[in-house]
């Protein structure tokens, strides 16, 4: 799964790398479910960036509480799920990050690790989003897709987020692409040779902690 991640690089670098304009930007060393996270969607006019509530609230939901249970979606079964299947063809997004955290069970304890791509460079998770509206209230929310782990991630956990390289990201954000099998072809484990990880402080366990010390190796 993916339950915590970071975004600490500069706004200017994100804009340059993704070809977007960001009106609002907040860096964070400990992004947690139900918080607002930076995402990008594709349209005929190009890419648009904005913030989503992390934890998908389907448009048919009675209330917002379901979102805390839908921070991730299994890529293998999204076309089978009522909450996700309609979104695959028309409401895809990517979530911007520069690392994520995962916990490994060691000697009866869960030990946190920071996982990075290409020496801590910018990358994007594959996601789905939806718009929920009730009595004048609107919430735009998203979920992060997960997949079986690659060889590196299997040392830590039995799932990992879908990380998209540039060609896969361009396909995922292309609104003209709607074929399920073509879209699902990019939902695969990222190349393990281009990833690394190290142990970090258990202070990351508390989402109220949010400073540079959380990404220091221990």
Image: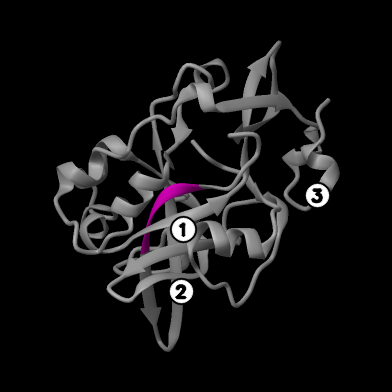
Quarter of the picture holding the C terminus: top right
The residues colored magenta run: 124-129
Indicate the position of residue 215 as horizontal and vertical percent values.
77, 39
SS under mark 3: loop
Indicate the position of residue 29 as horizontal and vertical percent values.
73, 49
Indicate the position of residue 53 as horizontal and vertical percent values.
52, 64
Residue 209 got which mark?
Answer: 3
User: Foreground residue, 165 or 70?
Assistant: 165
Residues at marks 2 and 1 touching, judged by CB atoms closer than 8 Å? yes
For marks 1 and 3, the one nearer the N-term is 1
Q: Main secondary structure of the magenta part?
A: strand
Pick out the residue farthest to the bottom.
Answer: 136
Applied colour scheme: one colour
Q: Please indicate whether residue 2 sits to the left or right of residue 150 in the image.
A: right
- Is residue 125 covered in magenta? yes
**Which is more foreground, mark 2 or mark 1?**
2
């Amino acid at each position: 799964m993916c339950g915590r991640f970071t975004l600490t690089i500069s706004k200017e670098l994100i804009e340059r790398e993704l070809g977007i304009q960001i009106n609002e930007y907040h860096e964070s060393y400990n992004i947690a479910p139900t918080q607002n996270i930076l995402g990008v969607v594709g349209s005929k006019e190009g890419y648009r960036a904005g913030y989503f509530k992390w934890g998908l609230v389907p448009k048919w939901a009675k209330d917002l509480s379901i979102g805390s249970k839908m921070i991730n979606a299994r890529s293998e079964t999204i076309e089978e799920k009522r909450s996700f299947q309609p979104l695959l063809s028309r409401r895809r997004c990517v979530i911007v990050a520069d690392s994520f955290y995962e916990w490994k069970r060691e000697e009866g304890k869960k030990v946190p690790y920071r996982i990075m791509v290409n020496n801590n460079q910018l990358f994007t998770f594959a996601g789905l989003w939806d718009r929920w509206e009730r009595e004048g209230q609107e919430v735009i929310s998203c979920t992060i897709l997960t997949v079986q782990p690659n060889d590196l991630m299997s040392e830590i956990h039995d799932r990992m987020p879908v990380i998209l390289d540039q060609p896969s990201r361009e396909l995922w954000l292309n609104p003209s692409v709607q074929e399920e099998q073509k879209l699902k072809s990019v939902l695969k484990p990222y190349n393990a040779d281009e990833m690394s990880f190290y142990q970090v402080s258990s202070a990351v366990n508390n989402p109220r902690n949010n400073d540079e010390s959380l990404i220091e190796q221990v």
